[in-house]
Amino acid sequence: MTNIDKSSTPSSWTGMVPVDDTALAVTDTGGPGIPVIYLNGSYASRRHWKRVIADLGPGYRHISFDERARGRSKLSADYSFEACLRDIDAVLAARGVDRALLVGWSYGALLGVHWANRNPDRALGVVGVDGPYPVGWTTEAEHEEIRGVFRRMRLMLPLARRLGLAARFSGEQHVEVAIEAHLLHAALGPVLENMPVPVRYVVASGEALGSRDDLQEQMRKAVDPFLAHNPNLEIGAKVTSNHGSILRKDSPAVAAVVRELAASARPEDRSAR
């Protein structure tokens, strides 16, 4: 674990953070600005945040990392959602950060709201990039459909890994991560209903690769009742790109929502660390 002198401005750092049986590749830009930690999609690497980080600029302390078996991080025996939550704790502890704003895409948005719900005194807010939505597949028939998707994609996984869109574990482990995420999304209602910190959604449009009919649009509509009941939940932006391309095509909109949420933090939080 890296020791931080909290009396000085944190310097930039890139390295490996140990946690459990593995180590995570982490980059911390340092600086005096509000800490922003970026949480990736299910199998994605941190490379997808480059445009958002560039759009936000050096006034923020950007902390990005690769999850287990993604990007440059090491393999593990545990790829569960709970392990991913522990990884957020490990990265923040290693970098000496007490409070942060969480920005998550897809699965990363699900991680962000769960972490914030468990740590409301440490979360300055969550920006959810096209998620999380309280809809998931819970039946065995639906889970078999997920398995079928990955069976059809098995020959594409090596290329997807090189593009930072697949993990370095088996197709069956990809399925396990996807099914667990669907179950957690399906059970998300109470978390959203009682979310104690600000959450801002950046909502995509249309359907992405692998989706069918108007499934993703229906998922987005499922959050509407929670927006009506909990004033901490708001739509920060609605963009024209789809789920898979939002960070590439609409990074300025994502950055604008992050900037707005960061500005609403109390003055003492804006240099939290």
Image (spheres, rainbow, N blue to C red):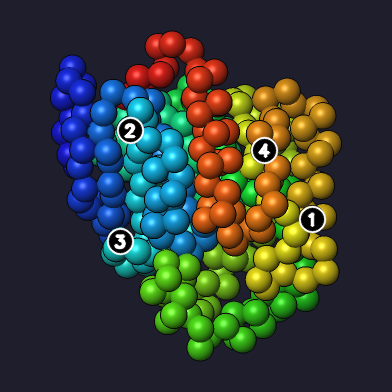
The secondary element bearing badge 2 is classed as loop
Q: Earlier in the sequence, mark 2 or mark 3?
A: 2
Residue 167 in sight from this viewpoint? no
Residue receiving disc 1: 217
- CB within 8 Å, label 2 to label 1: no
Along the viewing direction, whichever of 53 and 132 lies nearer the viewer: 53
The part of the image, by quadrant, that contains residue 8 is top left
Q: Which residue is mark 2?
A: 58
C-alpha gap between disc 1 and disc 4: 15 Å
Residue 121, numbered label? none
Q: Nearer the viewer, mark 1 or mark 4?
A: 4
Q: Are marks 1 and 4 in contact (CB under 8 Å)?
A: no
Q: Nearer the viewer, mark 2 or mark 3?
A: 2
- Sequence-wise first label, 2 or 1: 2
Q: Which residue is mark 4?
A: 237
Q: Nearer the viewer, mark 4 or mark 3?
A: 4
Using the rendered view, name the quadrant where residue 153 is placed: bottom right
Locate the N terminus by quadrant. top left
142 horizontally vs 109: left or right: right
Residue 97 in view of the camera: yes
Q: Which residue is mark 3?
A: 73
- 111 vs 51, nearest the viewer: 51
- Residue type pointed to by label 1: Glu
